Amino acid sequence: MASALEQRLAQHLTLSFAERDALQWLERRERHFAAGEIIVRENETTDVLYIVASGWLHGSVRLPDGGRQILRFYFVGDITTSFSIAWGYSAATLTAVSACTLYELPRERFGRLFQEHPRLGAMLFGISAAEQVALADRLTSVGRTDGQTRVATLLLDIYSRLRVVDKLSGSAFQLPLTQQDLGDAVGLTKEHVNRSLRALESTGLLERDGKMIRINDVEALAELVGFQDRYGHVATDWLPPTANRSDMDQRSAAAE
């Protein structure tokens, strides 16, 4: 069975047997968390990253006034707490939105992946760069647009990511987020989020049924709010070649 991270990367390039084996090797320490459970807190010392096998999570920071800003959401195949890798402590709080399964990944083991499989490392960097551009798009939306546009942009962002990581077909998906969660992600009160959702429904471009969201015309809604899908395609023509066995043996010997 393909690993979560393997399935994510295989969306963009054909993986060698050695690369698939290396990715599966990363997913050996499985942990389970309940909805609402905190995995790691902001400013907490950690040398572990997590690969999402199932469920939704978000990373957030606490604001000076006691409020919360959700920075990003995590789905199947994502590597979480990468915001801690530069310092050894977490720059945000990682919380399970729904019941989830994670694979615990020590930073040292993650570093060896870059050494032994540089093409995988480069692909992960490319995906991370695309996600940073998507985050910049959302921040621009938060700082420069009205509530309706902010909420629509976030929903389109989630929809676009689910198409890649969960192979979502159609335009309907379950949204296990509260209106408070949505507001904390786009800088609105939950009351403003509710008004924005109703306004979007009035256009006929969006429907809600409990936790189910249906975007009736993805292209029209994207055009209305100026959304660009940053996830569907990541260029791979610049990647280094696949490492062969002799290269890997030489790197391992040098590391020893």
Image (cartoon, grey):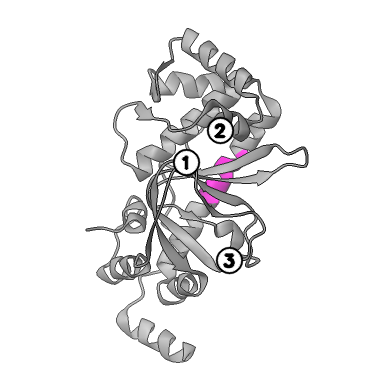
Report the quarter where the N terminus lies.
Answer: bottom left
User: Does residue 238 show up?
Assistant: no
Q: CA distance from mark 3 to mark 1?
A: 21 Å
The one nearer the camera, 97 or 22, is 97
Q: Which residue is the site of mark 1?
A: 97
In the image, residue 186 above or below residue 26: above
Element at label 2: helix
Locate residue 200 relative to residue 101 in the image: left or right: right
Confirm or deny contact between disc 2 and disc 1 (CB under 8 A): yes
**Earlier along the polypeptide chain: callout 3 or callout 2?**
3
- The CA span between labels 2 and 1 is 9 Å
Find the residue positioned furthest to the left: 1
Quarter of the view holding residue 238: bottom left
Question: In terms of sequence position, does the residue under pointer 3 or pointer 1 come before the other?
Answer: 3
Mark linked to residue 46: 3
- Boundaries of the magenta span: 129-136
Q: Residue at x 40, y 41 (%)?
A: 232
